[in-house]
Every structure is written in C-alpha cells, then in structure tokens.
C-alpha cells in the first residue's frame, strides 16, 4: 500500500499535533532473587502495599515475580521517569535481594521451589492464586517465571477523529476504533518478528531452566545453554507458549473484535479432556479454576492483545464486548539487561512508529497458511534471527529477513516524519539506529550479551548477576522526590485498606463465588471509608 497520499492528508489535517497525545503505559516484570542467586522465597515486601489492589506494584505468577505498572501518559520520558521511581522505591524494601536484570530466570531448583503469588484471604484473592496453580499444573511452573515488558498503547482521541475522516468511514466511532485496532493487531502479528530481532535480549539461559529435559540448545559453558544466533529464547519454543492448539484446536481469531471475543469465549466454556485429568477441586484444594481449554481469558498467550479497562471482577471479554478496544498491549519485549529499567526510550519511540505503521497498512484477514507462517517466523527469529541469510515465509515465498526488514523500515520513514512533525526528529533518527541493527546484527542486545559473555569469560548467570547488582546499586543511590515518596506511601496504605475491605465484604464461600463469577454475577467492589 502506498502510504504517501494518506500521510500527506493526515499531515495537512494536523495529525502530527494530535499524535503527540498518544498514550503509552508499561508493565515490567522482574524476579526477586536471593543473595545465593536462587529465586526469593520471601513474601512480597509488606511496605510496598497490597499486591491485590495496588495500582502500580503487584505480582504476576509467583510471589517472587514482581510487576511494576506505570500510568498511561503522553510523554514516553514521563513513563520511564515513573517506572524509575517505582524501581527506586522497590529497591529500598528488598533488603539483600536483587531484581533480576533479564527475562530468563535465575537458578531454579524445580517447580516446587517456585512459590505461587498470594493476595490475601478474600475470594477474589483465592481466585487469583488458584488460577496460577492451574497454570502451573497445565504448563509447569518454571515456564511461568519468565519475565517480560508489556507495552500498552492507545492513539489520541483527536487522531482517531482525523483518521476516521481521512478514511471517510461513517461507522459509529467506537466501532471504527475497535475494528481499526483489530486490523492493526493483525499487521503487528505479521511483522511482529521484527521486535525480538531488534530488541530481543534472551539468547541464553541457565542450565537449570530446562530441568534436565532434552533440547537442541548448545552448551555455552558447563552451566549455560544458548543458540548462537538467538535473539529471544523467551519468544521461542522453550519460552512460555500456550499449547492448546495442539490438543484442542484453540486459536484466537483476529478477523474482527466480535470474532476474537467469540473464540476466547468458546475456549473458556469448552471442557478439555487433558485438563480434566488434573481435576478441579481435589480434596479441599482447587487445582485449577475449571477444566476448560482456558481457565480465563488471560491464559491465552499472544504477542499482542486488544484490551479494555475492566471494572471490578469484570471478565475481559465482557469489557471488550461492552466498550470496545481501548488500547493494544504488545507483549513481545524482553527485559533489556543493558537498561536499568529493563526498557528504554529507543524501544518506546520505535514501537510508536510500529503501531502507526501497522494501523495505516492494509490488513486482510489471516488465513490458515499465513497463521502458520506467522508462528513459524516468530520461532525462527527467536532461535536464529541473527543467522546470516536467514529467510522467512511471506506471501507463499521465502524472503531474506534482512531484505524484508529494510522494506519495512523504508515504509516507516513517512510515519516517523509524521510523528516528528518534520524530517529531522527523534523518530526519524530512531529508524536510522534500527537500520544499523539490520545491517550489523552484532549491535542487537542479544548479540551484545553473548559478546560480553565471551569477552569476560562469563556464563549467563554471572552476566545477569553482575548487571542485576549494577542496577541495584544505582537505584539504591538514587533519590525520590518528596512528593513521589508521599504518593507511594499513600498508595500503599490505601491498597492495604482496600484489601481489608474486600476481605470483610465476602458474603459467600469460594465455591459459590467462583460459580457466580463464571455466571457473571459479580458483587460490587466494597467502598473505601
């Protein structure tokens, strides 16, 4: 598709100014690691507040897998500043623990040594823990402690108005926005392999991760496994992947928002024989929320998701059906070892270009063959992305990664100029840096990690430990502005009070609560006093 006339019309309509109101939010996961290099067994630090209700500091699968969440802001620098402040705060309450600086985990002594996240005594808290127990039973706990960065993005309302006018689309605005974002998601899947190539930072893993299983990973040293040209093992076959499609035929459909919601709803409501063997309530303990293809929507792994802000205990599919797509969540960013926050401005700027590029391109529905190509391309780039001459599948033919990547970056120049409001701004400069990584794969984070390991005679663990300690010391020396310190103290206290109110408001046992949840009979959230 020739974007030049579209970009010209958007430029003349004032889109550059409107796009400055786009919003970015981040969710960054980090493992807490004990001084001996193993996964921390301690509870979530109480001084940080309640992981159930705190808006910015929570946990993911494990009690040791902390998740830091920024608000959605229009300035990416402000997003990173907020994320930096949370890191400073958290590091003050870690005692002698560290936040692990990479996606792939530290030394893991088997799944039984990975504590499930705990959220208190309420029914809502129990449901979150049971869901995680179900994930562990279905896929193994070790896979669940791989950390990542999620990039949440929404276009400005003013831009949507301009874009719908440019398309001369008379649909209801909410419907137009939802379907346009589903179209964007399809294109993000088509060229999503570019993200792990440019920013993948998990080419190696501690030998303890594979738990003695047979793999074709090569041995870097006695304790480190890797692929020589890997970019992101996290996004490859050894990372966290749903396997529902292998045994159940489950694959989310992105043809439209309605098709997506229907495909997930089918999975949540359809029994799965292989999960029925686990059991649901065994004795007095729930082993999973149900024995269906998916326990809940969040179980379906995808590199990118349409999202809507949910109300208290509202199902994500219900929120999408009622209020449409609010924002898009890109989940393919590794934790970047070389960035103290795990993510930096270069990544955020490029992903904004990528979002707009994928929105404006034509986006036909994804047929079966293309779906297979998308999945295969992702694994190829994850395992062998820097391999000279690597070819990917596109339109029934093989195309060299380097050639395809340059075509994409060439097509992004006008997008970057629109975002910058001119031909010489940060987004245009960003594209030049990404082009250098295509021509010189040794500039990618994955290659830099392996080069540093070779130069210093380090394995994966030693590299990750050294950078984790470097970042820890920097955060411990950093200061928090008094108003930020006060804000975090207030949020921690409010989160604890809200958790206590939720616990006090429970009126039914957990069996009844769970039945009511799946029947969409949800109690109102207790008011704050």
Image (spheres, rainbow, N blue to C red):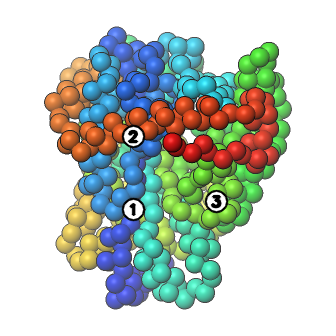
Q: Which is more N-terminal, label 3 or label 1? A: 1
Tag nearer the camera, 1 or 2 = 2
x, y (%) of residue 34? Answer: 36, 15
Rendered view: 46 above or below 518:
above
Q: Write down the residue under mark 1.
A: 23
Label 1 vs label 3: CA separation?
19 Å
Give coordinates of residue 272: x percent, y percent. 81, 36
Q: Residue 47's spot in the image, x, y percent?
A: 37, 26
Circles 1 and 3: CB atoms closer than 8 Å? no
Which class describes the residues within 10 Å of circle 1: few (<14), some (14-19), or many (20+)?
A: many
* Location of mark 3 (residue): 320
Rendered location of residue 387, percent (x, y): 39, 43
Mark 3 vs mark 2, foreground winner is: 2
Instruction: Work out whether residue 487 can be spotted.
Output: yes
Q: CA distance from mark 3 to mark 2?
A: 28 Å
Residue ID for mark 2: 491
The quarter of the picture where residue 291 lies is top right
Is the residue 317 above or below the residue 158 in the image?
A: above
How many discs mark residues in the rendered view?
3
Q: Nearer the viewer, residue 55 or 28?
A: 55
Query: Would you say 23 lies left or right of 275 here?
Result: left
In the image, residue 176 sits, relative to residue 191, either above or below, namely below
Callout 2 secondary element: helix
Q: CA distance from mark 1 to mark 2?
A: 22 Å
């Amino acid at each position: 598709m020739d974007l030049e006339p579209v970009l010209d019309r958007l430029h003349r309509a004032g889109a550059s100014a409107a796009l400055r109101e786009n919003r970015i939010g981040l969710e960054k996961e980090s493992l807490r690691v004990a001084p001996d290099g193993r996964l921390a067994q301690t509870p979530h630090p109480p001084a940080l507040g309640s992981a159930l209700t705190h808006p910015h500091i929570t946990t993911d699968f494990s009690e040791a897998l902390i998740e830091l969440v920024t608000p959605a802001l229009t300035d990416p620098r402000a997003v990173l500043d907020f994320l930096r402040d949370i890191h400073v705060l958290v590091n003050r309450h870690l005692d002698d623990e560290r936040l692990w600086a990479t996606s792939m985990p530290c030394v893991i002594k088997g799944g039984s040594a990975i504590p499930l996240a705990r959220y208190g005594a309420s029914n809502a808290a129990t449901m979150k823990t049971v869901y995680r127990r179900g994930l562990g039973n279905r896929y193994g706990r070790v896979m669940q402690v791989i950390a990542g960065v999620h990039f949440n993005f929404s276009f400005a309302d003013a831009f949507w108005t301009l874009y719908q006018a440019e398309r001369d689309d008379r649909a209801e605005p909410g419907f137009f926005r939802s379907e346009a974002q589903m179209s964007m998601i399809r294109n993000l899947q088509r060229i999503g392999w570019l993200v792990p190539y440019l920013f993948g930072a998990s080419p190696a893993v501690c030998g303890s991760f594979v738990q003695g299983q047979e793999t074709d990973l090569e041995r870097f040293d006695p304790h480190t496994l890797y692929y020589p040209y890997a970019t992101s093992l996290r996004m490859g076959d050894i990372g966290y992947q749903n396997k529902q499609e292998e045994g159940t035929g489950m694959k989310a459909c992105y043809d439209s928002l309605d098709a997506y919601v229907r495909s997930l709803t089918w999975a949540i409501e359809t029994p799965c024989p292989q999960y029925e063997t686990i059991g649901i309530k065994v004795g007095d303990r729930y082993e999973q929320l149900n024995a269906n293809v998916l326990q809940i929507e969040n179980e379906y792994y995808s590199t990118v998701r349409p999202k809507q802000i949910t109300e208290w205990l509202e199902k994500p599919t219900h929120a999408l059906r009622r209020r449409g797509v609010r924002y898009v969540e890109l989940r393919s960013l590794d934790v970047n070892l070389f960035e103290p926050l795990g993510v930096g401005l270069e990544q955020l700027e490029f992903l904004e270009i990528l979002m707009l590029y994928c929105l404006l391109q034509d986006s036909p529905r994804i047929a079966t063959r293309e779906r297979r190509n998308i999945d295969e391309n992702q694994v190829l780039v994850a395992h062998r992305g820097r391999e000279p001459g690597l070819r990917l599948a596109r339109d029934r033919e093989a195309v060299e990664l380097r050639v395809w990547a340059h075509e994409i970056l060439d097509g992004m120049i006008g997008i970057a100029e629109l975002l910058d409001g001119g031909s010489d701004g940060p987004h245009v400069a960003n594209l030049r840096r990404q082009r250098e990584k295509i021509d010189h794969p040794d500039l990618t984070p994955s290659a830099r990690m392996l080069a540093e390991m070779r130069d210093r005679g380090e394995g994966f663990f030693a590299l990750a430990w050294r950078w984790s300690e470097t970042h820890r010391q920097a955060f411990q020396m950093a200061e928090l502005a008094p108003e930020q310190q006060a804000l975090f103290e207030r949020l921690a206290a409010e989160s604890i009070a809200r958790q206590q109110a939720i616990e006090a408001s429970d009126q039914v046992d957990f069996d009844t609560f769970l039945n009511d949840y799946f029947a969409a009979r949800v109690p109102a959230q207790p008011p704050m006093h």
